[in-house]
Image (spheres, rainbow, N blue to C red):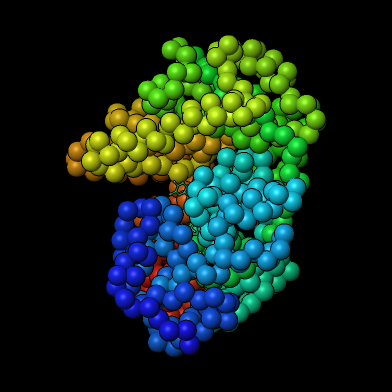
Amino acid sequence: MLPPITDPAVIEGYLGDASNTRGHAEALYRPRTAEEVAEVLAAAQARAVPVTVTARRTSTTGASVPDGGWLLSMERLDAVLDLEHAQGGVLLGEYQAQVERQGRLFPPDPTSRQECSLGAAIACNASGARSFKYGPTRPWVQAVQVVLPTGELLHADRASPVPAAWPVPRWAEPGVKTAAGYYPADNLLDLMIGQEGTLGVLTAAHLRLAPLPAGVLSLIAFFPDLERTLSFVDRARDGAGRRGRPGRPGALSPCAIEYYDHHALDLVRARVPDVPPQAHAALFIEVEHEGEAPLEPWWEALVEGQALVDATIVAEDEAGRARLHAVRHAVPAGVNEQVVRNGMPKVGTDFAVPDAALAEIMAAYDAVDMDKVCFGHIGDNHLHLNLLPTTAAELARAREIYRELALHAVALGGTVSAEHGIGKLKRGLLAEMVGPQVLSGFRALKQAVDPAWILGRGNVVAGP
Ligand SMILES: Cc1cc2nc3c(=O)[nH]c(=O)nc-3n(C[C@H](O)[C@H](O)[C@H](O)COP(=O)(O)OP(=O)(O)OC[C@H]3O[C@@H](n4cnc5c(N)ncnc54)[C@H](O)[C@@H]3O)c2cc1C
């Protein structure tokens, strides 16, 4: 079998993720083939040793943080095999760039796509701004090669049945963008998407591609108040193609609608001069097009919606794109600087709610009495409220507020995680979201797939 790496100095680099939590592990394996992955898992199974799959460690939920046992790194399974096939460890952005050079598009676009792996994007059903139009990663996967926790190497597509002994819970996922809990799948592929490295290791994937649009119109529109911002979101969504469903001909049909609140705009003002003083909120919008950029209908809608039209930044050329990039980049950069100044971690939400509940959850976010910045995927009613505590007491309060807001989102028909997944840090919230019956269904499924609970122990559901 592949020799383990046991040098603590090497293992050290694999023990944390973007959640700032750290774990421990006794050995690290860096397989080059699916067969080597299978051997490692079979050996771990025989010894009942926990195995944590680790890819690029951008998880924000502790999902790739090991709690003892072995680490299985995907870094050497990083080949793009052909246009529609790639290994699990390939960098998502690298695969997308190769596909785009050949005039095709692999739509899932997590913000971390230049830092995260394709296999983890599938394992976590990642999504991004474009998921408004294209949905999350799930519909863009046609098949995977997967190694089960027992070491069995399988092909899974939508015609592959779930083994009869696996009790997949039939539960009603919230009807919003969600990455929380096992998918109520009727086939092996869908079960393997979004399982956060607990039911199988995805060594390769067969992907579905879209045509690369001829052009993308990008703009940032500023609004004097929240009411007009939300009305414009409704206008932009009216008749639009959403999550893979076609839209109404003639509708505005953006592919992404992103929101920035006035705290976010204050961060931008400190860095770039483009934000008008009377702006209370902004929307960043992207529209794919074939012929001419559809500037006119958007302009008319912005005038009608009483946006601060003269301040609108439109990107049709390199200079415009650079200005847009500077504005957008200023927000996370400003948040990170504030976190460093505060010496306290931020507490960030990842909840989504149905369209009808957007105004209510935003009012709840607005009512939070703490330094905060809110931005994100408003098209999917999925905003990241970043609470910025300045003391240990405020941090404790931020975590309490976070929990209350999560339950509020659930009560509105939403989810505790729209895209970042459950990992180890949100297990309690998932339990509250789905209730004891579904949770015990998740546990029964895990037990059937992985009787010794070796794989991704502690993710999604607590260990045995
Ligand atoms: C700045 C930043 C921005 C982000 N933006 C987004 C965003 O817009 N949208 C979004 O969805 N997420 C986002 N994320 C979260 C994260 O990038 C994604 O969840 C991503 O898919 C993780 O990829 P990774 O390669 O870093 O995986 P890791 O962190 O190494 O692993 C994540 C999980 O996947 C499992 N795993 C990894 N590879 C495999 C495999 N081949 N087979 C089975 N299981 C596997 C691991 O065991 C772990 O449970 C962001 C994170 C950061 C830090």
Residue at the front extreme, as displayed? 319
Residue sitting nearer the eye, 106 or 392: 106
Q: How many marks?
A: 0
Residue sitting nearer the eye, 238 or 254: 254
| Left or right: 239 as drawn, with respect to 439 | right
Q: Position of residue 390 (x, y in %)?
A: 23, 36
Q: Position of residue 145 (x, y in %)?
A: 63, 72
Q: Position of residue 235 (x, y in %)?
A: 65, 23
Residue 462 visible: no
- 455 above or below 431? below
The residue shown at (31%, 76%) is 7
Q: Position of residue 224 (x, y in %)?
A: 49, 14
The residue shown at (67%, 54%) is 98
Residue 464 visible: yes
- 47 above or below 106? below
Q: Quadrant of residue 157?
A: bottom right
- 412 above or below 56? above
The residue shown at (31%, 57%) is 21
Quadrant, the C terminus: bottom left
- 139 above or below 362? below
| Left or right: 86 as drawn, with respect to 347 | right
The residue shown at (67%, 17%) is 299
| Left or right: 300 as drawn, with respect to 411 | right
